Image (cartoon, helix red, strand yellow):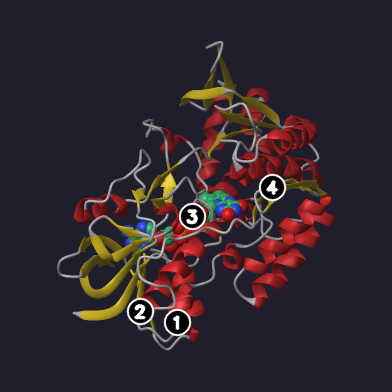
């Protein structure tokens, strides 16, 4: 059995920050992740709407860490942790392996939460992984292609109706982009589909759009979305999704209404990745309602002094599930391991700001938790910050070119067709046959 001074589980923001800090210090570590890439999740919606390619936002983690001699990378899903033996069990290509650790860093992130309605998972599109972005991109394309072919106006209407559930950053960004696609990209390629034929509805149970910002930034985001043609339905919960119909119920009046849509995108709520429950059980660590590990202030878990957990898989003092938190926690833990930070030192988050894009040339930014900005300057800041955090010079260069052609021009360099289209042809036939019958 191989043993490493440090084993890191995951290849997201937290894991990468920890790995880089350990790599620079020459500490031998093995990073085990269930995906081959380091995924820049905040740009997933741009991959789903053809602005960036998935390769640009998801470079291989093995390649990123190749510059560190002390780094080992393994593809595998960690399924168990034994704090007494200091061992981790992971499954890879149908085989189970064991690896020993001196210190363990769990950075396995979060998945979508369906609030007890797990059947919604199969009826909606998500946006958490590269595969999710590709599936959504294919769906958007196929809806337009099918809308172009169908002779039934009702089928066409449903195909061109998109419902986004959850008005956090992901939902707002997606709703704005799908509207923008209708106006500035597909309008040029489908003369029979007017932008007004495309309906985008953004639904959330709370009153505010972008509730994490609140106040005038939320109002600004709502006004921008509405002026672009997004139908914003807040204070309304999704109570059912079936047969391409979404039922929403007003939280106050309890009145229900339905929205027909072939595409429903779920971006409401998160729950901890599976490994959290195992770690909690093995170490006696408490979890919150979303299954996140309630870590100690120094980011250790339960009774295990040598197991740390960071990022979205954890909950600490109400810190947001955002990449800067995961990155700062990754560095804090790595520095604790290398001795640069004294053992037991509490983690302190430095809030440099949060931001969300709302549409073309518009974004909202809150700097250092208090300075609010919105509009084109905020939008430029958003682009600059995201560019800075993208991994690799080539990816940054390609992103700038893609953004220029998408935002200033009307191109989407990465909308391409796939073989999935063949499978959807059959559905078009069935619809047309149904309409004819
Ligand atoms: C669509 C979207 C948009 C977002 N936009 C923003 C934004 O604008 N700004 C912002 O700050 N934050 C944003 N976030 C949140 C941000 O991406 C997360 O806070 C951040 O990714 C958390 O980092 P992490 O390292 O904890 O987990 P992740 O980045 O999710 O990484 C988890 C890793 O663990 C791996 N993994 C999971 N389970 C296992 C297992 N059992 N064994 C091995 N590996 C495993 C996964 O493959 C993945 O590599 C967004 C998130 C999404 C989904």
Going from N to C along the chain, the mark reached first, 3 or 2, is 2
Residue depth check, mark 4 versus mark 3: number of the one nearer the observer: 4
Q: Is mark 3 within 8 Å of ligand 1?
A: yes
**Front one among 154 and 270:** 270
Residue at horizontal 65 percent and vertical 71 percent from the top: 395
Circles 4 and 1: CB atoms closer than 8 Å: no
Question: Secondary structure under badge 2?
Answer: strand
* Residue 113 makes an appearance in the image: yes
Residue depth check, mark 4 versus mark 1: number of the one nearer the observer: 4
Say the numbered circle drawn on residue 396: none
Residue pointed to by mark 4 = 370
Q: CA distance from mark 3 to mark 2?
A: 25 Å
Circles 1 and 2: CB atoms closer than 8 Å: yes
Residue at horizontal 70 percent and vertical 41 percent from the top: 176
Going from N to C along the chain, the mark reached first, 2 or 4, is 2
Residue pointed to by mark 3 = 129
Residue at horizontal 54 percent and vertical 58 percent from the top: 323
Going from N to C along the chain, the mark reached first, 4 or 3, is 3
Label 2 CA crowd tier, 10 Å (few <14, some 14–19, many 20+): many
Q: Is mark 1 within 8 Å of ligand 1?
A: no
Question: Secondary structure under badge 4?
Answer: loop
Q: CA distance from mark 4 to mark 1?
A: 35 Å
Residue pointed to by mark 1 = 23
- Image coordinates of residue 310 in percent, x first then y, are 41, 59
Say the numbered circle drawn on residue 29: 2
């Amino acid at each position: 059995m191989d043993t490493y001074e440090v084993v890191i589980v995951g290849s997201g923001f937290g894991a990468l920050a920890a790995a880089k800090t350990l790599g620079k210090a020459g500490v031998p570590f093995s990073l085990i992740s269930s995906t081959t890439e380091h995924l820049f999740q905040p740009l997933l919606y741009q991959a789903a709407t053809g602005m960036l390619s998935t390769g640009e936002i998801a470079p291989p983690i093995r390649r990123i860490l190749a510059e560190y001699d002390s780094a080992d990378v393994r593809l595998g899903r960690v399924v168990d942790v034994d704090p007494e033996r200091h061992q981790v069990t992971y499954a890879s290509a149908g085989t189970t392996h064991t690896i020993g650790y001196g210190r363990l860093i769990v950075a396995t992130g979060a998945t979508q939460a369906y609030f007890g309605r797990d059947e919604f998972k199969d009826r909606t599109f998500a946006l958490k992984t590269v595969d999710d972005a590709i599936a959504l991109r294919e769906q958007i394309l196929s809806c337009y292609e099918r809308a172009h072919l169908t002779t039934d106006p009702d089928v066409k209407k449903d195909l061109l109706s998109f419902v986004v559930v959850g008005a956090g950053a992901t939902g707002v960004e997606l709703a704005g982009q799908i509207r923008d696609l209708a106006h500035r990209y597909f309008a040029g390629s489908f003369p029979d589909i007017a932008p007004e034929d495309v309906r985008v509805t953004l639904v959330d149970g709370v009153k505010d759009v972008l509730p994490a910002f609140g106040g005038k930034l939320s109002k600004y985001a709502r006004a921008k979305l509405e002026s672009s043609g997004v139908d914003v339905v807040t204070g309304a919960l999704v109570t059912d999704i079936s047969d391409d119909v979404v039922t929403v119920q007003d939280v106050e009046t309890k009145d229900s209404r339905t929205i027909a849509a072939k595409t429903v995108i779920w971006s409401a709520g998160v729950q901890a990745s599976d490994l959290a429950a195992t770690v909690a059980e093995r170490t006696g660590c408490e979890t919150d309602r979303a299954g996140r590990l309630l870590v100690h202030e120094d980011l250790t878990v339960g009774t295990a002094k040598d197991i740390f957990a960071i990022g979205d898989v954890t909950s600490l003092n109400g810190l947001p599930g955002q990449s800067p938190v995961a990155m700062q926690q990754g560095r804090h833990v790595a520095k604790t391991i290398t001795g640069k930070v004294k053992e037991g030192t509490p983690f302190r988050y430095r809030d440099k700001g949060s931001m969300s894009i709302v549409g073309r040339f518009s974004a909202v930014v809150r700097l250092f938790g208090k300075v609010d900005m919105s509009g084109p300057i905020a939008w430029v800041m958003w682009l600059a910050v995201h560019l800075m955090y993208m991994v690799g010079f080539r990816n940054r260069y390609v992103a700038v070119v893609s953004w220029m052609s998408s935002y200033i021009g009307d191109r989407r360099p990465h909308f391409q067709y796939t073989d999935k289209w063949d499978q959807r042809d059959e559905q078009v036939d069935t619809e047309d046959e149904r309409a004819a019958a």
